[in-house]
Amino acid sequence: MTVTTARYTPAALGRLWSARIPLTAEVGAYAGLFLAGFLLRFWDLGARALHHDESIHAQWAWRLMQGDYTHSPIFHGPFYYHFQAAVFFVFGTNDYTSRVSAAIAGTAIVLLPLLLRKRLGPAGTLSAVALLAFSPTVVYYSRFLREDIYMAFFVLLVVAAMWRYMAEGRERWLIVTAIGFVGGVTTKEGMFLTLAVFLVFLDLFVATELARISLSRQRVADDEADEAGADIQPREPSGPRLWMLIAAVAPFSVPVVAFWPFLGRLRTRMGWTTLPRSGDLLVLLGTLSLPLLTPMVRGPLESLGIVNKDIPLADGTFTSRLDWDDHLLTNITTNDRVFLAGLFLFTTSAAAFVGLQWKPKVWGICFLLVAAVYLTLMTTEWTNLDGLVSGPWGSIDYWAEEQSQGFRGEQPWYYYYLLFPAYEFLPLAIAAGGAFWAIFRGDAFSRFLVFWLVGQFAALSYGSEKMPWLNTHLAVPACLLAAWTVQRAWAAVPTESRRRILPALGAITGMSAGALLFVVFLPGGTGYTIARLAVAGVAAFGITFAATPFGRRSAGLVAVVAIAGALSFFSVRTMVDASFVRGDVPKDMLIYTQSSPDIPDVMADIERIADATGKGKYLPIAVDGRDSFAWPWAWYLRDYKCVAYPDLSAGVVGRSLCQGEDQPYAVLLVNKSSETAVQQWIDDNEPATYGVPFVYPHRWWFPETYKDAVQVNGNFSCTGRSGDCSPRSFDTWKVIAKGIFGGSWPGTWYDYWRDHDPDLISGATGDRRCNSCGSVDALAYFPSEYDRTTRVYAPADAEPPHPTVDVAGRPEFGGRGSQPGNLVRPTDIETDTEGNLYVIDQARRMLTKFDADGNVIASVDVRTAGDTAEESQPWGLGLAPDGRIVVADTFGWRIRVFDATLHLEGVYGETPRLAAGEPPGLLELYGPRDVAVDSLGHVWITDTGQDRLLVFDLDGNPIRAIGTEGSGPGEFNEPVGISIASDGTIWVADAYNARVVALDAQGQFLGAFPVDGWGGADAEDKPYIRALSDGRIAVTLPVAGEVRIYTRDGVLDGTINPQDVPLDRPYGVVEGGGGTLWVVEGGASRVRKFVLP
């Protein structure tokens, strides 16, 4: 008896564990590249401030972990929200972990080319891994919490599974294709754009294969063969007949594969016995896509009148019954649900009919897998049944309407022509050289790579949304096509020559790299140009000499190695700079509206204050909700319990009532556009609560000067919504040709390619890390007790402040607070014969007397005693010969007179009637900004709002008015500061006329000289003036942060503009003796002494 023992076959998991990986050079290279790719994606992930979009996605993932997430098509997802929430759950919540899921996806992309090793070959696969590992675009967005890197992973997974299936025919790869499909469509709606490219290719591929089958079965025999009855072998189909048949079949590829089982007679006639594997993929991807494309029927249904599109909205516009954003989001009815269910039932039934006739088991598994994953994620694990509408209907409906209505990003049609080669120049250069091989001498896979890259580029360029992160979807196919080119070039070299050619390739790499580095970084000039040409010539000769022994078949490989050697350094440098050196400084086109690095610094300040005050996470904070300013603060302040997001455009901050405690907000984060209104509210309500605000860029962006480059008529920027630069216009191409061949475009693009630094190109300078970048600026108001310079929170002393010095040793006094001697918004200053100083504070409405060193002597509220509600905002001071102090109460519409001990002696002036057609009376004061008193005791007042000067005596009796509105002699436009020289000359700061005016003692015009920098309309930009004892004139430029000294003839004779501690809104000035000048800094709440230049 013979006993037969079945051969043991280990299970798949057992085979995996028992597999042995040989330690070869190739394996070592892969290990090194994977390690590099991993480190590039995970190193220092939390260093960069979270971008506006990143903060939204991180916040939503955090909310999902908290059980508070519902799907919204506006912010894509929901796959990566779940993925990131899982990361938060395992590793905790912070800036670093917020990008971990993206880094994982980016690392996985580096691994996926291994699935295509049979298609790419050993050299090609290794090249693909290297190019993806170091790609500037892929690395940057692998460190960026946005959906594109996840989508890129799923797209590449679909590609790998498609071609593995076409090579092997194993149905497991169809299931993997379905996994990639559902991952992509639950990540971003842009997946459908890429799927459209794939489906068009599959349609053409199916037509090609079917045409080849038909032609190959046609037997053509000569007369002898026919007589002999010989068995004729099919001819290889080619030529015009093949192309004509492909053109005939291609329009019908989809219905042919969809109804394949029912086309027996046609298939017999054409010789189509079995459906090509490309047809299997067309059926699978088509039927999985069809139900999710149901929203595309909305337009036809509206055109046919089946769906009402005239539903009125509150703003007077109309919307459609099936519009997700305007109607279904907030007002979905039972009838709407039933109607939508009917539409989806129809498209799903159609897909099922085709799929179940094709491969019932495989299609059923794939469809149920996709449906289960898709609906579970869209409904947040079936806790949000509205996701059954927001996902299947809302996703496509919302984004289709967005694309049809506007141009997101406001970019020109040539955007990717600039962006793509600026970052992916290495794979692009290699792929461009290999495109001919790929199309005419390659295979279906290489043609697919070309079709994918060109189709994706065309789709993105034609589409209305153009954003830098979409460059990811160009970088991946470019890297694969370049890798295929490398393999083709390597395979062209005879096997026996490959080992011998390696030293030569090393030499070629070194020569090309060294030559380009020399050429690029050598300074300009004729001599250097000759040197460049010489070095390039020597390198070309050396490369040719090194390659000559290996013949013409090595030419392609030599070219690829020379390109890679020359460009690799610059590609890696571009990647490192974009991702690590200036990740949140938008000097790169790859970075769009980035949050500034100051935001994490401000957050650190908030945490210090929270700890120092003992309020911890209950620290009351107000964030301006204007213009999406709340992001990324909603992420950074996610754990704080007392955060409010009011719209501060009207300036009303209010107070926090968190935890039942009525208190001022400890921190205000304000949009710069709200500054004037908010500052006024603070001055009126909380003048001593906050210190000097810290100004910083909240979000900033790359300088998009390229939008103006193509202007046919020179009137508009060339963007999606405006401009006259259509690519279909001959005039557009004339402008482009002029810019390329007769203008500065090549030089500008070269400079940017080399350094990626727009500051160097524009020549912009300043104290920001990007001085040419546009920005939305912000102000951070911290408690007056917090010193941001030392990062120390110290409660204010009960004692008055003492004079101190700045970092350069210059005397200063004041500082925010509520004690006598503290200053909040000081504006003007005077000194008496004893050297005492008088300062007016418009925010606190306080007149304060200091000694010559800045020690406080006395202080008084200028308003009527006990009436804190009285309208008042004093800006100007004047000192009478008898020692009395005159205050110009600008928005109290009054002049107030105090004695030397700060006791009120008198008030005069009236609120202006502003009667049309009637001249104002002499007592009507409309915003009196400053005063000066002459030797006769006459008070000269700049009646700013009525563009005139008024003269009173000290008792308030009007004497005369001088000037009218205008720009001629004796006319004024916004007179502000006024000062009287020792010779009696009256000097006036005529702000909007941007000039200094000189008058004699009677008010007659003597002359004027211009002041560059005056004339701004900023409500805080009010210049003051002082006639100095040496005859010169000192003027202030508040917004510019500068004091200038002029001669009486208007010649600039010096400036005060310290760089160590810049002036912050300098207003009034007065001499301090010994050749010094006290300067009031309204923006810094202090008075500082400088040496007169």
Image (cartoon, grey):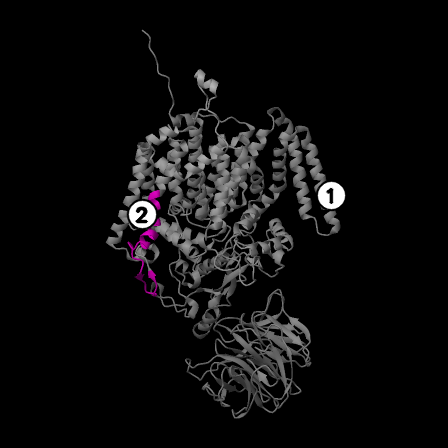
Residue nearest the viewer, comparing 558 with 1078: 558
Residue topped by disc 1: 534
Left or right relative to 1047: residue 305: left
Image position, residue 170 (x, y; %) = 39, 29
Residue type, numbered disc 1 = Ala
For label 2, the crowd category at 10 Å Cα-Cα, with few meaning under 14, some 14 to 19 and many 20 or more, is many
- Looking at the rendered structure, the secondary structure element under dot 2 is loop
- Looking at the rendered structure, the secondary structure element under dot 1 is helix
Number of disc labels: 2
- Any magenta on residue 306? yes
- Where is residue 765, by image quadrant? bottom right
The answer to whether residue 69 of the structure is visible from this angle is no
Whether residue 66 is situated above or below residue 450 in the rendered picture: below
For label 1, the crowd category at 10 Å Cα-Cα, with few meaning under 14, some 14 to 19 and many 20 or more, is some
The answer to whether residue 700 of the structure is visible from this angle is yes
Q: Which of marks 2 and 1 is in front?
A: 1
Whether residue 870 is situated above or below residue 676 in the rendered picture: below
- Which numbered circle lies on residue 379? 2
Residue type, numbered disc 2 = Thr
Left or right relative to 153: residue 983: right
Image position, residue 596 (x, y; %) = 51, 57
- Which numbered circle lies on residue 142? none
Image position, residue 98 (x, y; %) = 44, 48
